[in-house]
Amino acid sequence: MHAADWSRRAPRHRHARSRHRRVEPLRAVRPGGSSSDEPHVPIELSVPHDVQHGGQLGANPLTRRDTPPAQLVARAVPSQQGRGGGTGSHRQTSEGAPVSTATHLPIDGVAVTGHQGKIIDQNDPRVLRELAHRLVRLKIDKPKSPPPAAKNQHPCAQDPDLKFKLNAAKSADRIDREIAQLESRVDKAAEVVSQRFDDVISLLERWDYVSDWRLTPRGALLSRVFHESDLLVAETIATKLLDGLDPTSLAALCSTFVYEHRSPEPAPEPTFPSTQLKSRFRQIQQLSMRLQREESAAGLTPHRAPDAGYVDTVVKWASGSELADLLDEDTTPGDFVRTMKQLIDLLRQVAQHAPDEVTRGAADAAVDRVLRGVVLSASTMPIGGAA
């Protein structure tokens, strides 16, 4: 009995004793008739009630001993005419078993697919597992497709452009889905950009680069610095960590912003020619770590930390050493020239925008010391390498 039909029965039918009563055998039910237990429901096909609700294919402790076990395994065969026009629930039963709801579709008949001849014990897990395996292995043929004539009964089948229109409709649906996906991506991207902008503004306000949507003097300095770690460079200049250094030491300290150790081997301990240079680098390191923490807290990508691996090399190069004396296994001439050109670019920015005039002069002199030899040749070489 399907749960949806319980409300239409009298209370007495909800008692277990109502299952004891026999119903009409399958052969005694005519198409379009009804069960004596369920007079309001037409009967076309039947399977046991206890099987539908996970019970035993056979004797049921609640049924009378003279009730024959279920022997029929069947499936409904929907009719082609009147599909969708049926009213009420169709019922199913096997001979001697209670009536059960099967489907709301019109049914033409019964297709027998197999028999379960052995009465099983529903309290034995092994027997139930064996029954489950049998049902999984049971091969049921698919219902036959309706004849071509039935398929062509719809008025649309007579349209000579039907195939073209169906393809056009599929294309339109696909385009609609793609447009919806693109709109969703744009909306999400706009939200991400807006949130990132707010996070950047909040960070700049905390570091005194923006106030009331206006640039502070530090903000004006930051706007003129072009570097991957621009905020760190601007903060280093603003906190006067580049002031009071000679041109060679200034070039060496600025190299910590452009050099990056790329070898898979661990970087060697950096060498500092003077305690002053070492002290300034340690202060820049602490500043960088504090800024990285705040960038991470704001959901921003932290900047690359400064690297002092080229300090000693830059000091020697700016002091007049030859390139051959500076190269090692991990440094190629190309790498050296590229690093020096990046360093010269940063020194020129310091020479133009540092607040302290002495620092600007030292940066300008540092450019002259670095821009020599192979670095000068590579910087003045025309595009394509032609002389």
Image (cartoon, rainbow, N blue to C red):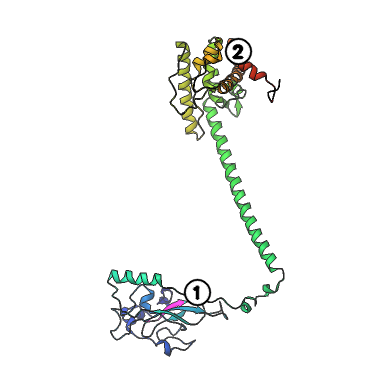
In this view of the protein, can residue 8 be seen by the observer?
Answer: no
Tell me: 252 left or right of 17: right
Amino acid of disc 2: Arg
* Nearer to the camera, 24 or 164: 164
The residue under label 2 is: 360
Residue under the image location 58 percent in, 38 percent down:
194
Closest to the camera, between mark 1 and mark 2, is: 1
In this view of the protein, can residue 386 be seen by the observer?
Answer: yes
Q: Position of residue 23 (x, y in %)?
A: 38, 86
**Is 59 placed above or below 384 here?**
below
The residue under label 1 is: 142
Q: CA distance from mark 1 to mark 2?
A: 87 Å
Q: Position of residue 253 (x, y in %)?
A: 52, 16
Q: Position of residue 365 (x, y in %)?
A: 60, 10
Tell me: 307 left or right of 190: left
Tell me: 254 left or right of 279: right
Residue 144 sits in quarter = bottom right
Q: Mark 1: few, some, or many residues within 10 Å (few <14, many ≥20)?
A: few
Amino acid of disc 1: Lys
* Nearer to the camera, 149 or 137: 137
Q: Secondary structure at mark 1?
A: loop
**Is 50 placed above or below 235 here?**
below
Residue interval drawn in magenta: 98-102
Tell me if residue 26 is in the magenta stretch: no
Please identify the quadrant where the N terminus is shown: bottom left
Please identify the quadrant where the C terminus is shown: top right
Residue 348 sits in quarter = top right
Residue under the image location 61 percent in, 27 percent down:
214
Examine the residues drawn in magenta and state their main secondary structure: strand
